Image (tube, rainbow, N blue to C red):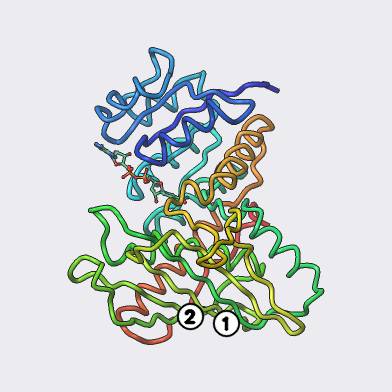
Amino acid sequence: MKRTVGIGVFGVGKMGQAHVRRINDSLRGARVVAIGDPAPEFAHKAAPGLDLPDDAVAESITEMCARPDVDGILVAAWDGEHEAAALAAIAAGKMVFCEKPLTPSVEGCRRIIEAEEKAGRRLLQIGFMRRYDTGYQQMKQVLDSGRIGDPLLAYCMHRNPSQGERFESHQIITQVMVHEFDISRWLFGEEITRVRVDRSRSTSKAPEGLIDPLTAVLWTESGVRINVEAVCFGRYAYDIRCSVLCEDGDVALPDQLAPTIRDASGVRHEIGTDWLDRFKDAYNIEIQSWIDSVIAGEQDGPSAWDGYAAQAICEAAAEAMGSGAEQPLDLMAKPAIYS
Ligand SMILES: NC(=O)c1ccc[n+]([C@@H]2O[C@H](COP(=O)([O-])OP(=O)(O)OC[C@H]3O[C@@H](n4cnc5c(N)ncnc54)[C@H](O)[C@@H]3O)[C@@H](O)[C@H]2O)c1
């Protein structure tokens, strides 16, 4: 077993560069030995700022997969590039970490599942980092313990201050709500069976024509009703909240770890504006856990199945947004490698 593994990072925008830095500066057992990007000239531009070996830039995912010093590949390219990169890595027998969404289509997710089935084992972990957040883990412990009874209702709030210039309406579901969809499946240990989407008056802070905020209602197999609220141009902060009403009590996500200030104007604590700060510890724990999987040669984090199930909810929600009607979910049978 290797003690230090070599990592290739494919896609070096904001997220990919943050992962390169966290692997090299904060985590143990791995070094980034290669980077690449669907736009290779961008990888060449980014490399000097990342303190990498001289030969680090790979011109393509194929070149990265062929390098013997690359044991695992982290895909942080834009959504539409995930499928090709993940399939190339799986075909080369490399462990792969893929940022969410697994792919922007359910069909693409199925192709990744088929590739893992063909390989006969799980090779991919998907980037649902909230599962590694201490607050969500504490909530799950309370729910799993049964000490406040069975869950009945959940409320998930996801408020972003703003989005980049390329942001489009449908991404409120695929980029933002997808985290709430995954965390709901994980918190309750159940699949989602149907979804409805409700519009509201849009904020004047959003670009012309963009639908923001958006709410979705989901139901789990046992009937828990989950209310999801997503705001992309909420201005005031990056504010993530979650609470669950159970038969004998209520459990809520602890607020951000910030000191409480008391002064003449009242009692308050700050709320950050950046998702990288809010989930910094979760990202570190998530990527460390993936590195440990690469070292061990066995994958156990959130899987391609989780990516597929979340994407199926996204597609049903998009359908429901268009029709205004409740949309049932029809998942494929779960392959044995994900049980
Ligand atoms: N897990 C999470 O919480 C989380 C958070 C953010 C993003 N993501 C995912 O990570 C992936 C990458 O997101 P990102 O925020 O890094 O996107 P990004 O826009 O910063 O980068 C994506 C791609 O855009 C191109 N690009 C970026 N900056 C460029 C520049 N200055 N010049 C030329 N090309 C440039 C590159 O090809 C790069 O790979 C996406 O799939 C996204 O969904 C996940």
Q: Which residue lies furthest to the front in this view?
A: 264
Q: Which residue is drawn at 43% across and 82% down?
A: 196
**Quarter-wise, where is residue 327 in the image?**
bottom left
Report helix, strand or loop for mark 1: strand
Quarter that holds the N terminus: top right
**Quarter-wise, where is residue 137 in the image?**
bottom right
Judge left or right: residue 336 versus residue 219: right
Q: Compute the Cα span from label 1 to label 2.
A: 7 Å
Vertical order, 282 against 247 (above or below): above
Q: Which dot marks residue 217?
A: 2
- Residue 309 % position (x, y): 52, 64
Q: Quadrant of ligand 1?
A: top left
Judge left or right: residue 133 versus residue 52: right
Q: Which dot marks residue 225?
A: 1
- Residue 51 % position (x, y): 42, 19
Foreground pick, 288 / 124: 288
Q: Residue at x 62, y 84 (%)?
A: 223
- Residue 94 % position (x, y): 53, 32
Residue type at mark 2: give it: Val
Q: Residue furthest top?
A: 54
Vertical order, 186 against 274 (above or below): below
